[in-house]
Image (cartoon, rainbow, N blue to C red):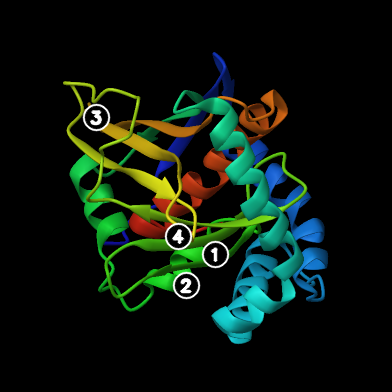
């Protein structure tokens, strides 16, 4: 689908950010992510660092990644249980918006959802330094191991894009496409979900990216995760429609 690079502007909390600012946020996260997974920080510009770090994570494989992050994952599972119990089904959201010049809502979601792509796992992993593992499981769910924005811990969860049963965020009738689903822990506890909605605009599309967390989640995590969304989705848009930077 790659053609010319799209132009992307990010809106967080009513403030507008450029692609260059988002790339700077990504560069800031690389050293911490490399240290957490025990890989050397790659040399070169950000594009070279991103490619090399992605290759390093993929070469470890899922089992080794889980082994290296086992302490985080164990503590994260316990914390997810506690925050979910305290929240009693109530949710808090982390929201980021994109305005993209180029492509369409349906084209992007079609690319995002296409687990048959040869580069699916690579593109999902490469979108953020804190993505340690994102892969499609045989049952169709998406397995994610990442450091959520603002959290000191990496966590593992599963997203079921066929299940909307416990999402609190309503579907917007003006959305032309969406990627939405419930998130659960490895033990099946519902801990939130995503409702990412996309609407065509003249010359491109608008994205409203929304992640639901348990209500008891710390405000700092909710705030910082907006940058996480900006980093990963800006990269995914460029992977889908143009040359990544």
Using the numbered discs, state the Cα–Cα distance from disc 1 to disc 2 in whole angstroms.
6 Å
Task: Return the x and y of residue 222 as percentages of the image width and height.
Answer: 62, 29
Task: Return the x and y of residue 91 as percentages of the image width and height.
Answer: 48, 25
Circle 2 residues within 10 Å: few <14, some 14–19, many ≥20: some
Residue, disc 1: 126
Residue, disc 4: 243
Residue, disc 3: 199
Residue 168: image quadrant is top left
Q: In this rendered view, identify the residue nearer to me: 101 or 38.
A: 38
Sequence-first tag of 4 and 3: 3
Residue 19: image quadrant is top right
Circle 3 residues within 10 Å: few <14, some 14–19, many ≥20: many
Sequence-first tag of 4 and 2: 2
Q: Residue at x 29, y 75 (%)?
A: 138
User: Element under label 1?
Assistant: helix
| Label 1 with label 2: CB-CB less than 8 Å | yes
Using the numbered discs, state the Cα–Cα distance from disc 4 to disc 1 in whole angstroms.
13 Å
């Amino acid at each position: 689908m790659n053609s010319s690079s799209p132009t992307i502007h990010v809106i967080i909390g009513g403030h507008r950010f450029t692609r260059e600012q988002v790339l700077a946020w990504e560069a800031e996260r690389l050293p911490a992510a490399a240290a957490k997974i025990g890989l050397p920080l790659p040399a070169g510009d950000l594009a070279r660092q991103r490619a090399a770090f992605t290759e390093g994570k993929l070469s470890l494989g899922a089992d080794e990644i889980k082994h290296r992050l086992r302490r985080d994952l164990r503590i994260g599972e316990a914390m997810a249980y506690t925050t979910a119990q305290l929240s009693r089904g109530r949710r808090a959201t982390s929201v980021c918006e994109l305005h993209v010049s180029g492509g369409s809502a349906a084209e992007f979601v079609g690319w995002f959802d296409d687990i048959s792509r040869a580069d699916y796992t690579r593109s999902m992993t490469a979108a953020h330094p804190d993505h340690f593992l994102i892969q499609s499981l045989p049952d169709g769910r998406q397995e994610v191991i990442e450091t959520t924005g603002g959290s000191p811990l990496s966590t593992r969860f599963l997203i079921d894009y066929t299940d909307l049963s416990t999402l609190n965020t309503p579907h917007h009738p003006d959305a032309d496409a969406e990627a939405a689903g419930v998130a659960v822990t490895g033990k099946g506890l519902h801990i939130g979900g995503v409702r990412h909605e996309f609407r065509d605009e003249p010359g491109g599309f608008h994205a409203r990216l929304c992640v639901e967390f348990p209500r008891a989640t710390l405000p700092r995590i909710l705030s910082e995760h907006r940058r996480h969304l900006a980093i990963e989705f800006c990269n995914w848009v460029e992977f889908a429609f143009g040359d990544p930077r």
